[in-house]
Amino acid sequence: MNKLNPKPTAEAIFNFPCDYPIKVMGKDCQALHTEMCAIIERHAGEIHPHRISSKKSTKGNYISYTVRIVATSVSQLDLINKELQDHPLVAYIL
């Protein structure tokens, strides 16, 4: 973009606070659900069960979760994503 139209910041695009989906995929095990919730709650507060949806893979070996949080900043989202990416039970984050 040119100088008259600077590239918008992530803060401007998201208009914080906002509803934000975090998508996590990994092996289908209770530990993934427990650890994922603990990581997200550390940064975003308590997650109510109705804010979590899941879908198992066709063969049932993997599961994907969508957790809806109220995001307050890009740095909050970065911290959540970094911690989830570093966890051995998490295969992918979208």
Image: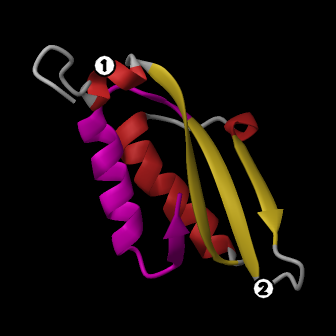
Q: Is residue 91 magenta?
A: yes
Which of the 4 quarters of the picture holds residue 14? top left
* Left or right: 93 as drawn, with respect to 17: right
Image point (28%, 50%), residue name: 79
Q: Position of residue 86 (x, y in %)?
A: 34, 73
Label 1 SS: helix
Amino acid type indicated by mark 1: Ala
Check disc 1 and report the residue beneath it.
12
Bin the neighbour count of mark 2 within 10 Å (Cα to Cα): few under 14, some 14-19, many 20 and up. Answer: few
Asked if marks 1 and 2 touch (Cβ < 8 Å), the reply is: no
Q: Nearer the viewer, mark 1 or mark 2?
A: 1
Check disc 2 and report the residue beneath it.
61
Q: Is residue 29 magenta?
A: no
The N terminus - image quarter: top left
Q: Position of residue 17 (x, y in %)?
A: 41, 18
* Left or right: 89 as drawn, with respect to 56: left
Location of residue 65 with respect to 7 vertically, above or below: below
Label 2 SS: loop
Image point (39%, 16%), residue name: 15
Q: Nearer the viewer, residue 16 or 51?
A: 16
Looking at the image, which residue sits at the far right? 58
Bin the neighbour count of mark 1 within 10 Å (Cα to Cα): few under 14, some 14-19, many 20 and up. Answer: few
Q: Label 1, label 2: how many angstroms apart (C-alpha)?
A: 39 Å
Q: Which mark sits nearer the N-terminus, 1 or 2?
A: 1
The part of the chain drawn in magenta is 69-94
Amino acid type indicated by mark 2: Asn
* Left or right: 67 as drawn, with respect to 64: left
Looking at the image, which residue sits at the far left? 3
The dot on residue 31 is: none
Q: Position of residue 65 (x, y in %)?
A: 67, 57
